[in-house]
Image (tube, rainbow, N blue to C red):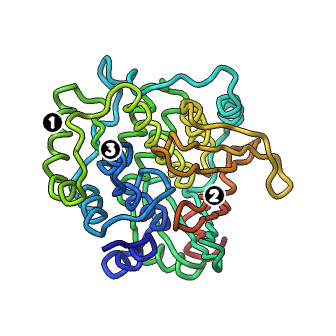
Amino acid sequence: MTVDEMDLVRQLKDDVPLRPEAYEQARAMLRDAMPRERARRRMLGVRGKAGLGAGIGAVAAVAAAIALVVTSSPPPAGPAPAGQAGSASRAPATGSKLASLAALIKASGGSLPGNASLVIRIQTIGGKSPEVSYNLYTDSGAFYGGGDKKSLMQAVARDENDADGIDAREVAAARYAASGDLSAARVRMVNASPNYLGLGRSPAARKKIWAQAKAKSAKIYKEKGITFPPNPPAGQALREDADNYVWNNSVDALSAGGGDPQVRAGVLRLLSTISGVTVARSAAGGQPALTLTAGPEVFGGGASEVLTINARTGMPIKAVLPADGNLPSSVQTFQVSRVTLAGIEAGRF
C-alpha cells in the first residue's frame, strides 16, 4: 500500500495536533522510505529532518520513521571529542556572503525587545488556497500555535504549550554559533534533534547507536528489500548527512528564533559551512534579498530547497519546495516580529 504526504497528514490528524511543519515532515518521512542509499541512511533521522523533496513510500516505512522519533534521544550538545567534530565540519568560504552578513548582523545587534518571536506563515501547496498559521516561539522555549489571531490568543491564555524541546535546542545552537567555534556549533546543531549519526560520541558509542537503530528497523528494512548499512556513515557520507541536519535544523531555528539577531547571525554562519548551498543576490517585495539554494547533494539527490532572506537583516522571507515527482510544490512566506506574551494574550499584534 502506498500513500502520499497529504494522506499521511490526514492520518496523523486523528492522533496528534499538527505542528506548522507537518507537511514538510510528512514529505521528508516519505522520502526516507525510498530505497536509495542516501535516503536509507536518512531514514535513521527523526522529526522528518531529511529534506523537503520527497517521493512516495509504504505506510509501514513511515510508521518506522515515526517510531524512531518517539524512541530516540539527542546526543550531548557540547563540543565533540577529538576526531569527531572535524569529520563532519566545514569552514565557511572566505568572504562568503552569508558569513559577511552574519558579521554585520552580530555587530549591529542591540538589546532584544519583547520575550517571544511571532511568525505568521502563509503556505500554498500545489497552487491550492493559501493556509495561514500563527506561530509563537517564546524565549523560554514554549510554542503556541493557532490558525488565526483569536486561536493564538486562546492558546496563550490556556497555556497550551506544544513545545517538544527541539526548537529550543536549535535556537540555542544557533545563538552559540554566532560567536562560537563553527565545528562545535555544527555538532550542536545536528544534535539539537534526535538522530543516529552519533556526532560527539566515541567510535564505539556511534557503533552502538547504529546497532540499536538497525535492530529497531530490521523488520521494515526486510519488508522493503533494503539492506541496512552495516556501519554508521563516515568521511564524505557523514559530512553530507551532517549538512542535511545543519540545513534543516538551522532553518527551523530561523523560524523559532528569527526575531533575535544573534540567532540569525548564528544560522547564517552555520549555513556558510555547507558547500551544497549557493547564494545569489535578489529582491523580494521591493527589498534587497539573498536567495539561498540548498542543492540536491544536501538532500541525497532529491529536489533542491530555496530560502529567501532579507539581505540586510537575515530575516526569512520565503521558502520554496519545487514539485518533485508526484508531489506538489510548496511555497511559504514569513512575517517575523518581536512581541510579548502579555501583548499576544491582549490581542495587541
Mark seen at residue 278: none
Mark 3 or mark 1, earlier in chain = 3
- Quarter holding the C terminus is bottom right
| Amino acid type shown at disc 3 | Arg
Of badges 2 and 3, the one in the foreground is 3
In the image, residue 115 lies at what x, y percent? 55, 56
Q: Is residue 343 left or right of residue 139?
A: right
**Residue 82 quadrant:** top left
**Residue 114 quadrant:** bottom right
Of badges 3 and 1, the one in the foreground is 3
Residue beneath disc 2: 320
Residue at 29% across, 21% down:
81
| Amino acid type shown at disc 2 | Val
Mark 3–mark 1 distance (CA, rounded to whole Å): 16 Å
Mark 2 or mark 3, earlier in chain = 3
Residue beneath disc 1: 208
Mark 2–mark 3 distance (CA, rounded to whole Å): 25 Å
Residue at 66% across, 34% down:
98
Q: Is residue 48 left or right of residue 123?
A: left
Does 213 sit above or below residue 124? above
Q: Residues within 10 Å of mark 3 (few under 14, many from 20)?
A: many
Q: Residue furthest front?
A: 225
User: Do labels 2 and 1 touch, CB within 8 Å?
Assistant: no
The answer to whether any part of residue 159 appears in the image is no
- Helix, strand or loop at mark 3: helix
- Helix, strand or loop at mark 2: strand
In the image, residue 56 lies at what x, y percent? 41, 65
Residue beneath disc 3: 41
Does 130 sit above or below residue 101? below
| Amino acid type shown at disc 1 | Lys
Residue at 15% across, 57% down:
219
